[in-house]
């Protein structure tokens, strides 16, 4: 009861919120600054963004403060010790996965097309840059000299985006004849086919270098500066991610976004509204794929190595878990889901494994190797999926239906009595298990 | 003047011959009803008109133009609204979003608001539930929403597939009254019904379909007193 009272007081009082968020950021910033090895401090500082999300500030304020945390505070606080690069590595990967999950969210969450081979587009982006930023392209390109310089990276972000979108459409065309379970199977096949092709395309002409992969991919270069460290890639990813989030937000409420939702809800009714089914679905595949393609290019440059083992079915499932965990169709939800799953994967499980290893080394307990948390990733995902399907199918931050814009209301109020008596905040949290 | 004309339409589902040479006509300003028992081919007729299924042979003329084989999203844009069997609203979208979807191709916000106002005039219940999710509405409310959504298209021809299905008699009454009112205001209506009695009462003309064939046609009042029709459908 008291907690509830407290929460509602906080909710009503913006100044109080500002103080809490401000204090939280200062404290977590200081903790990380002082205790460089503390992964917990790092995660808590990241979590300030979630806190920010729940405040009632305007969107602009949230973006500004969030931007400040991500652009300045987080890198600054983390930069004081040896763990700097590994923190930035985690943050960079979180960003990459968020962009991919947002892409998959368009396909699965908005358009309702279950895609189990989504990592294929990430692979396409990676190989697009990987092949031309190594000497690999010399094997089959009749002109030009390879590797291309690191300056080409910036152009390749767009090329990767286009290549992935193109394949999204190519995949879409045959796949659109099937629905539901069959669609899932066909996309799963597509994902595997792409990986196997990359794995085998070293004969008759060596295009992908097969299972050996492509090594020493050129790092990006801008004004003579080479991007080699995670702390640098962090900013590339951040910029792309912000662009992606803006695009997603725009798309969601645009005409195509509404068409996606209509198609998801009921194809026949959507058509009866004048919606072109094929075009709408292809757009979903293309847009979703393009985000992955861009991040694939970044991934190839960051790892400086590309091989088929990075693009297995488990990757596709992982991205799907992010979307389901966060909340299908919900942009903030998917961002949170992607962050949690990536951090769980990279930090929590590895940390836990290290800790258990320490314990067994010092003879406190003995944990068999096979049971180490890092190896239980799939098991843990399985549990998460089952628990969420049972208890919270709408995800952590469920998708909301739009409510009246206050401004809209005023505009039409005088001449349209229909709007009177409609109150803001009528969002329904009722979920239909369909 | 004939707004819609089906000429000798044959439609198949694989090997099943669902429509066997169906010829019907709907004049501008009319309510025409198509009655028949389960599996007679009523829904198939509407689906063939809207383009969800393609006829093997025959011709569909709308406004004097041949629209045979036109895909459904195009027929929708040309002013034919199809309220399919079983409502098919968008369950996880709010009532308001459902309505807005009906005006999908309209850009003008003011026009959308005007049309919505019109829908509220016919269905005041919808107005009270704007923020509720479509799927959480009652069956009757969903039917109203489905019709309201079609009205948002401001169609020339409104095709309703069994709007009375599963509804309480009083709601059925209301819906038929609204259909009548819409027609009085100039909308042409093609009404598919099993509830033959009520449909024939408000219809100008009617067709009886039986296993894919039109077996009878006439004025609504004529069919209402016809012995065969009474026996088969009004018993
Ligand atoms: N998708 C389909 N595939 C195969 N056969 C179908 C399909 N849809 C309808 N049919 C068959 O076509 C015939 C006509 O069906 P239709 O749905 O038009 O009947 P209806 O007159 O609307 O019946 P009801 O009053 O029960 O809705 C039926 O025999 C039905 O089994
Ligand atoms: Mg039917």
Image (spheres, rainbow, N blue to C red):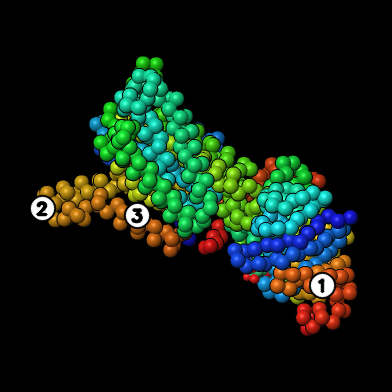
Residue A206 in sight: yes
In front: B199, or B93? B199
Label 2 neighbour load within 10 Å: few <14, some 14-19, many 20+: few
Label 3 neighbour load within 10 Å: few <14, some 14-19, many 20+: some
Q: Which residue is mark 3?
A: A381
Q: Nearer the viewer, mark 3 or mark 2?
A: 3
Residues beneath discs 2 and 1 located on the same chain? no
Q: Which residue is mark 1?
A: B216
How far is the residue under mark 3 from the one under mark 2? 30 Å
Q: Is residue B97 above or below residue B26?
A: above
Q: Residue at x 28, y 27 (%)?
A: A216
How far is the residue under mark 2 from the one under mark 1? 92 Å
Q: Is mark 2 within 8 Å of ligand 1?
A: no
Q: Which residue is mark 2?
A: A363
Residue A178 x/y as whole percent: 51, 55
Horizontal arrangement in the rendering, residue A7 relative to residue B218 (left or right): left
Question: Tag 1's secondary structure?
Answer: strand
Q: Nearer the viewer, mark 2 or mark 1?
A: 1
Q: Residue at x 74, y 51 (%)?
A: B67
In front: B180, or B36? B36
Q: Residue at x 77, y 45 (%)?
A: B111
Please, which chain is the residue tagged with disc 1 on?
Answer: B
């Amino acid at each position: 009861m008291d907690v509830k009272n407290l929460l509602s007081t906080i909710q009503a009082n913006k100044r109080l919120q500002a103080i809490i968020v401000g204090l939280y950021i200062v404290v977590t910033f200081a903790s990380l600054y002082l205790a460089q090895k503390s992964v917990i401090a790092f995660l808590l500082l990241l979590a300030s963004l979630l806190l920010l999300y729940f405040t009632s500030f305007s969107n602009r304020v949230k973006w500004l403060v969030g931007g400040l945390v991500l652009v300045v505070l987080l890198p600054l606080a983390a930069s004081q010790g040896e763990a700097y690069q590994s923190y930035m590595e985690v943050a960079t990967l979180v960003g990459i996965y968020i962009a991919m999950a947002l892409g998959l969210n368009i396909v699965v969450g908005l358009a309702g097309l279950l895609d189990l081979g989504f990592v294929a587009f990430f692979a396409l982006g990676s190989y697009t840059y990987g092949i031309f930023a190594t000497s690999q392209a010399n094997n089959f390109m009749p002109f030009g000299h390879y590797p291309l310089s690191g300056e080409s990276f910036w152009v390749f972000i767009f090329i990767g985006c286009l290549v992935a979108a193109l394949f999204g459409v190519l995949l879409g065309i045959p796949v659109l004849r099937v629905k539901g379970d069959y669609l899932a199977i066909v996309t799963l096949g597509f994902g595997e086919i792409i990986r196997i092709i990359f794995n085998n395309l070293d004969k008759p002409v060596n295009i992908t270098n097969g299972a050996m992969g492509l090594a020493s991919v050129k790092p990006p270069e801008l004004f003579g500066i080479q991007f080699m460290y995670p702390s640098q890639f962090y900013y590339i990813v951040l910029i792309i991610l912000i662009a992606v989030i803006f695009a997603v937000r725009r798309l969601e409420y645009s005409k195509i976004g509404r068409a996606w939702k209509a198609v998801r809800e009921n194809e026949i009714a959507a058509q009866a509204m004048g919606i072109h089914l094929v075009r709408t679905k292809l757009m979903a595949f293309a847009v979703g794929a393009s985000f992955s393609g861009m991040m694939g290019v970044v991934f190839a440059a960051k790892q400086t190595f590309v091989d088929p083992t990075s693009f297995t079915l488990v990757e596709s499932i992982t991205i799907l878990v992010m979307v389901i965990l966060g909340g299908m169709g919900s942009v903030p939800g998917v961002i949170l889901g992607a962050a949690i799953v990536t951090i769980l994967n990279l930090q929590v499980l590895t940390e836990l494994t290290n800790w258990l290893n320490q314990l067994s080394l010092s003879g406190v307990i003995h944990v068999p190797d096979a049971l180490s948390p890092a190896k239980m990733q799939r098991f843990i995902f399985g549990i998460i999926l089952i628990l969420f399907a049972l208890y919270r199918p709408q995800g952590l931050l469920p998708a909301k239906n739009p409510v009246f814009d206050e401004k809209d209301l005023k505009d039409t109020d005088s001449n349209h009595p229909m709007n009177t008596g409609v109150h803001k905040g009528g969002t329904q949290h009722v979920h239909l298990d369909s | 003047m004939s707004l819609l004309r089906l000429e000798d339409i044959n439609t198949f589902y694989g090997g099943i011959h669902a429509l066997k040479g169906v010829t019907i006509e709907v004049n501008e300003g009319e309510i025409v009803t198509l009655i028949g028992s389960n599996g007679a081919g009523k829904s198939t007729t509407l689906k063939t008109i809207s383009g969800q299924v393609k006829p093997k042979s025959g011709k569909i003329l709308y406004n004097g133009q041949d629209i045979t084989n036109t895909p459904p999203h195009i027929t929708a844009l040309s002013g034919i609204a199809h309220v399919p069997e079983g409502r098919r609203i968008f369950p996880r979208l709010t009532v308001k979003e459902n309505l807005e979807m009906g005006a999908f191709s309209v850009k003008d916000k003011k026009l959308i608001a005007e049309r919505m106002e019109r829908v509220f005039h016919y269905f005041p219940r919808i107005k009270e539930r704007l923020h509720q999710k479509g799927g959480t509405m009652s069956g009757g409310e969903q039917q109203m929403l489905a019709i309201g959504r079609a009205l948002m298209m401001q169609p020339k021809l409104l095709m309703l597939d069994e709007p009375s299905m599963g509804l309480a008699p009083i709601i059925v009454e209301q819906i038929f009254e609204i259909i009548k009112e819409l027609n009085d205001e100039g909308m042409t209506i093609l009404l598919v019904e099993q509830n033959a009695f009520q449909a024939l009462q408000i219809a100008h003309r009617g067709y009886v379909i039986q296993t894919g064939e039109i077996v009878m046609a006439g004025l609504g009042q004529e069919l209402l007193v016809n012995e065969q029709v009474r026996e088969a459908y009004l018993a």
